[in-house]
Amino acid sequence: MQKYSVFSLIKNAFSDHMNWEVAWKDPTPKKEYDVIIIGGGGHGLATAYYLAKEHNITNVAIIEKGWIGGGNVGRNTTIIRSNFMYDANGRFNEFGMELWRNLSQELNFNVMFSPRGIINLAHSDAQMNAYARRGNSMRLNGIDAVLLGREEVKKHIPMADFSDDVRFPIFGGLMQPSAGTARHDAVAWGYARQADSMGVDIIQHCEVEGFNITNGKITGVRTSKGEINAKKVGLCVAGSTNILAEKLNMTLPIETHCLQACVSEPVKPLLDGVVTFGAGHFYISQSDKGEMVMGGDLDGYNSYAQRGNLPTIQHVLTGGLALFPFLSRLKMLRTWGGIMDMSMDGSPIIDKTHIDGLYLNCGWCYGGFKSTPVSGWTFAHTIAQDRPHELNSELSLNRFSTGYLLDEKGIGTKTWIG
Amino acid sequence: MLYIKCPYCGMRSQNEFAYGGDASVKRPELNKDVTDKEWDDFVYNRKSLRGKHIELWHHVSGCRQWFKAQRDTATHEIFKTATMNEEI
């Protein structure tokens, strides 16, 4: 594999950039693989990469219905954080933060990880107490957390509405300084390029139509490009999880919903980190290109449409205007939607299933992108060793029937109510 | 913007309604033994398929009645709405 560096850039400039090697190949599927990963998004590509790198399993295929990186890894708002209260979620995502910090070097691909901090705003004394508790829990797990007062928040976001007569006056906030953003497409492409170089077959435009199961053990998948045998199969299909589960005669604690985001026209730098305004169902950051990147609630009903409705965008931006009145003068550039695998307790599932050799990675709700590296890392371990790693042992499928929920947000089973 | 036909009030815009989830979920009967699996299916497990979906809506800013709708989850076309005691 060609190494990307300033020298390779200069060298290729002399040939008008016509001689770069392809970043990944376009192979025809083999008859059989050790492991098939269904879903060529961030999580699937990362899983294949860590299977090859950490477990030396390289006879691996990624099967993708569309093109790699065309789903939620290309549609998210690029936020990376580990500001969780529960131990299982905190430890899991903080391990992920360690992977993020070294990811550009490891993949030889600039993922533009930028730890610029995230602030969750608080609007009452009770909420400040709750944030103090969450911050303390984070610090006990080795995650940086700073409780900010009103004046400290003002230093970070002086352009917010700090007047007293607003519906949700800013009391303070909880900040994770090491959180940040990254270039989402680069994450998918970086993992794809490295996985391909280690022998993983990336098979695009190949839809899974069914599963071959003999005596409770998976033996392969039926696809639009024919049958492919496999000893093990991993599902990393986010919003399509319920569709594949039906083909497996499984029902899962997951509903599929549409989540939207939008960006404004680009403006000069004015917002350093990420700000979440939970009370207004709104969050915002500024991209490196200068666009204000915004999002908020789900559309509010089960959906497989990768486009959203206008009432939700209006609702989200109404919250945004309440916090940042300057937004009223910006033009909206794009809105788009992605379909989320909303788990019933708000936390993901990375586990084995009752079918031997079939593994499940789903339930990412609003925040799959931040966990891309750690999800791939732990899922690869779960597949390779046929048992969960300590980090994902509590992200189990049976926690719903046993009662060991990870209900970090405490929103119950109405997944569409954020 | 969806337009939803409330069985009581007629066609209204989406803003007047709140969503209530899968209408095909049945609470296990109380006067018999209920297995953990049945409770699990009732509380947590959902099919949530692409295509026709029977679901509950609440005309919360209107007549405040709950009713059922059959909607396509990919195209959002609403085929039918019905009161709670009607078959859909």
Image (cartoon, coloured by chain):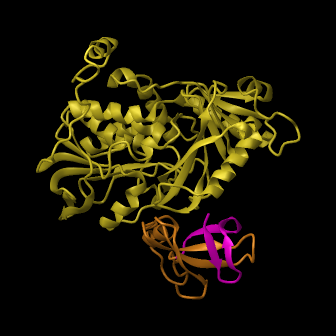
Chain colours: A yellow, B orange
Residue A239 shown left or right of residue A234 in the figure: right
| Front-most of residues A52 and A266 | A266
In the picture shown, does residue A179 fall above or below A236? Answer: above
Quick one: A200 or A362, which is closer to the camera? A200
Residue A381 seen from this side? no
- x then y, percent, for residue B51: 43, 70
Location of residue A276 by image quarter: top right
Residue A406 located left or right of residue A393 = right
Residue at image coords 66%, 49%: A316
* Residue furthest right in the image: A165
Q: Is residue B51 left or right of residue A57?
A: right
Write down the region rendered in magenta: B1-23
> In the orientation shown, which residue stands out farthest toward the bottom?
B86
| Residue A138 visible to the viewer | yes
In the rendered image, the vertical position of residue A96 relative to residue B70, given as above or below: above
Residue drawn at point x = 45 percent, y = 38 percent: A371
- Name the residue located 57 percent from the left edge and 35 percent from the top edge: A83
Q: Position of residue A98 (x, y in %)?
A: 44, 26
Task: Pick the quarter of the image with the N terminus of chain A.
Answer: top left
Q: Is residue B8 magenta?
A: yes
Image coordinates for residue B25, horizontal then vertical, percent: 51, 75
Residue A329 % position (x, y) = 72, 37
Q: Quick check: is A237 in the magenta stretch?
A: no
Task: Determine which quarter of the picture holds residue A56.
Answer: top left
How many discs appear?
0
Task: Specify the farthest residue to the front.
Answer: A16
